Image (spheres, rainbow, N blue to C red):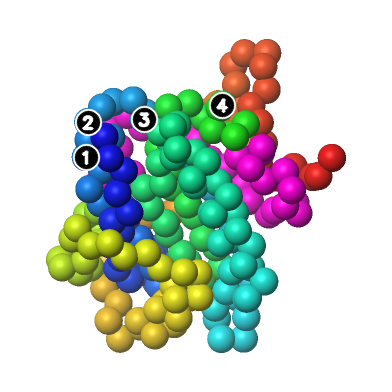
Amino acid sequence: MVLTQNFSSAVVENSDQKLVFMTLRTGISAFRNSQKLKERVEITWPYIPNEKGQLSDHDAQLMEEMKEKFVPAVEKDKLGILTGLYTEPDKRTFVFYTRTAKIFGARLNECLKDMPLLPITLYVEIDPQWLEYDEMYEFMHSADPEAISETDTEFTSEETSELISEASPKASSKKTPKVSPKNAPERVSESGFETDSDEEFATASRPKS
C-alpha cells in the first residue's frame, strides 16, 4: 500500500456557528479496507488567536515542528496515518488512525522529548469502520461538493488561519460535529491514555527529563 500526500479542504460552520477549516486526506481506501487501523487518536492543541484571529507565529511554528517530527515517524512503518485536521478559531485537532494507541502514544513521547511541554490532549476511540472519517467527508462534501478530490494539496498553519479569516462569505450553513465525540469511552482520559491493565499508556504532554 502506498501512502500518498493527497489532501482536500473546505470551510464549514460548527455547532457554535464558528468557522472551521477542515482538511481530509484522500486516496487512503486501501488502508481503511485493510482493517488494521482500528483505533482513532485525536491530538487537540488549544491556542490563543492573535489580534487578527489567527494562529500566532509562535504557535504556528510549534505546531509545524510537532507535525514534522511526529507524522513521518508514525507513518514510516504504518503504525498510524494522519487522516484529517480540524482548525477552529481557538484550537487545532490532528486526527490519526492507528494500529495501537499504546505504541502510538509512546512514539509520540519519543518524538517530542526535545520539545518544550506542549498544551496538547489526546482522545482515543475504537473506530474500525472509520465513522469519524466518513462524517468529516460528508460535512466537507456538503459544504463544497468539489472540495473532495484527489489533489495533492497541503496547507501550512499560516495559510490555514488566513483562509479561515477570509472564508466567511463562502461558509456553508452545515454544522460540523464537536471535535471530540460526545460519548468518550471509559478507557480514555482527557489528558492522556488509560488502560484496563496495570501498564500505563504514554502521555504526550510530558516535561523534558
The residue under label 3 is 37
- Judging depth in this view, the residue of 97 and 90 nearest the camera is 97
Label 1 – label 4 distance at C-alpha = 24 Å
Question: Tag 3: Cα neighbours inside 10 Å, few (<14), some, or many (≥20)?
Answer: many
Q: Which residue is mark 4?
A: 102
Give the quarter of the image for residue 192: top right
Give the left or right position of residue 209, taking residue 203 as reference.
Answer: right
Amino acid at the residue labelled 1: Ser
For the record, the magenta segment spans 108-135
In the rendered image, residue 129 lying in the magenta stretch gets the answer: yes
Where, by quadrant of the figure, is residue 201 drawn? Answer: top right
Furthest residue toward right:
209
**Image quarter hosting the N terminus:** top left
Query: Would you place residue 68 above or below residue 160 in this image?
Result: above
Which of the marked residues, 1 or 4, is nearer the chain's N terminus? 1
The percent position of residue 162, horizontal first and vertical second, equals 45, 81
* Residue tagged 2: 33
Asked which quadrant contains residue 189, the reply is: top right
